[in-house]
Amino acid sequence: MLDKNGIAKRIAKEVQDGFYVNLGIGIPTLVANYVRDDIEVEFQSENGVLGMGPFPFEGEEDADIINAGKQSITTLPGASFFDSALSFSMIRGKHVDLTILGAMEVAENGDIANWKIPGRMVKGMGGAMDLVASAENIIVAMMHTNKRGESKLLKACSLPLTGVGCVKRIVTNLAVLEVTDQGFKLLERAPGVSVETIKNATEGTLIIEGEIPEMDI
Amino acid sequence: MINKKVANVQDALKGVSDNMTFMFGGFGLSGIPENAIAQLVKLGVKGLTCISNNAGVDNFGLGLLLQKRQIKKMVSSYVGENDEFERQMLSGELDVELIPQGTLAERCRAAQAGFPAIYTPAGYGTEVAEGKETREFDGKMYVLEHAFKADFAFVKAWKGDAAGNLIFKGTARNFNPNMCGAAKITVAEVEEMVPLGELDPNQIHIPGIFVQRIFKGEVFEKRIEQRTVRPKIT
């Protein structure tokens, strides 16, 4: 079974040379730490920066340079700043190659819910609805089950949707899955996790074809 | 040169009154019009509708107006950092319209650019699109979203001049340029008011035509919401 850093490490393998990538808050943010350093990748943050670098050294943080998680950051040579409308032009206009975000629920048809629990938690969708409505390449990073042990990979989402039929790939602490017309197709198992465990943790239709390899991370 | 410069925040906010709709630039606490917010708290105007990506934190930014119950309705994309906000929202004291961040930006830009509405794919098939007109273009569904109508836009820039020209800094730019000229009156507060002619016309982000009033802010606290650092390697 993977921890959050393990999930990030596995997703980092999906990041290709020349990609512009938008990372959501939480596990997705960690992906930046594991991207191979022999490829060129630029990270976009929807609050208006392309070419994000690591966190600043203590004493060098700047209130005018933050990411979408409101964390102080730095920029790399070649970086640029822009306004929010232009930022979402990059996103809706499909100029960003890969979007990695977290989710509360994903359905077997690719629906995603990650912004609201009616009556309990309403933080808002931020840029997630714009991202999932347009991105061609969306990877969801999340735990396979919630805190109560219930599956987050469902036949249909129970929470208010963020987007419909948009998720292509999911990386959890247990598995890598692909969303297909028939349901969740199991591609890889996390180290030491059996197909049976994944089956039991998946409420939606799970397609298992042949031997399922263990992740190489 | 058409002079947009006013002496202080008091003059800059002349004409604000109860039940108006205001736009506020800023993302989190970065690039927020701190001086205008402080003055609105002083003036005590109530029943406000505020269009702003976030709602500040409990004791800063728009959180200050929330504490004084001056806000009737918030139009935002993300409001996760404010306990008082959550309390007022869940108790029904505060009306909240949550909309996708890109839609928020584009509804500002539409107002600035003279478009009555725009089509966006964001939110299609979700509760955000409920009751809204939808339309198919090239096999994909889009939602019709209307331009905002606001009385004042309060924005914050790094540098400006008496002509109202503005330059923003870093990610403090965010929604600020999109809100300039998107309301009946745009009020810009700047960290530095530079002499006319000092700003390179090639480098100006927002031309003064979009700004009605500009003043040098007295205080900019510029808080960092999530201070994250890495240790220095020695």
Image (tube, coloured by chain):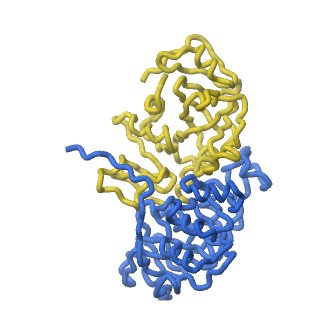
Chain colours: A yellow, B blue
Residue depicted at x 58% and y 52%: A126
Residue depicted at x 70% and y 40%: A159
Where residue B25 appears, x then y in whole percent? 53, 67
Judging depth in this view, the residue of B93 and A47 nearest the camera is B93
Judging depth in this view, the residue of A150 and B199 nearest the camera is A150
Seen in the picture, residue A23 relative to B79 is either above or below; the reply is above
Q: Is residue B138 visible?
A: no
- In this rendering, the count of numbered labels is 0
Determine whether, in the image, residue A143 is placed left or right of residue A57: right
Q: Is residue B78 visible?
A: yes
Where residue B183 appears, x then y in whole percent? 62, 74
Quarter holding the C terminus of chain B?
top left
Where residue A181 appears, x then y in whole percent? 70, 27
Judging depth in this view, the residue of A144 and A181 nearest the camera is A144
Determine whether, in the image, residue B133 is placed left or right of residue A69: right
Residue depicted at x 58% and y 17%: A197
In the image, farthest residue toward the left: B234
Residue depicted at x 57% and y 52%: B80
Determine whether, in the image, residue A129 is placed left or right of residue B220: right
Seen in the picture, residue A137 relative to B137 is either above or below; the reply is above
Where residue A138 appears, x then y in whole percent? 57, 38
Judging depth in this view, the residue of A34 and B121 nearest the camera is A34
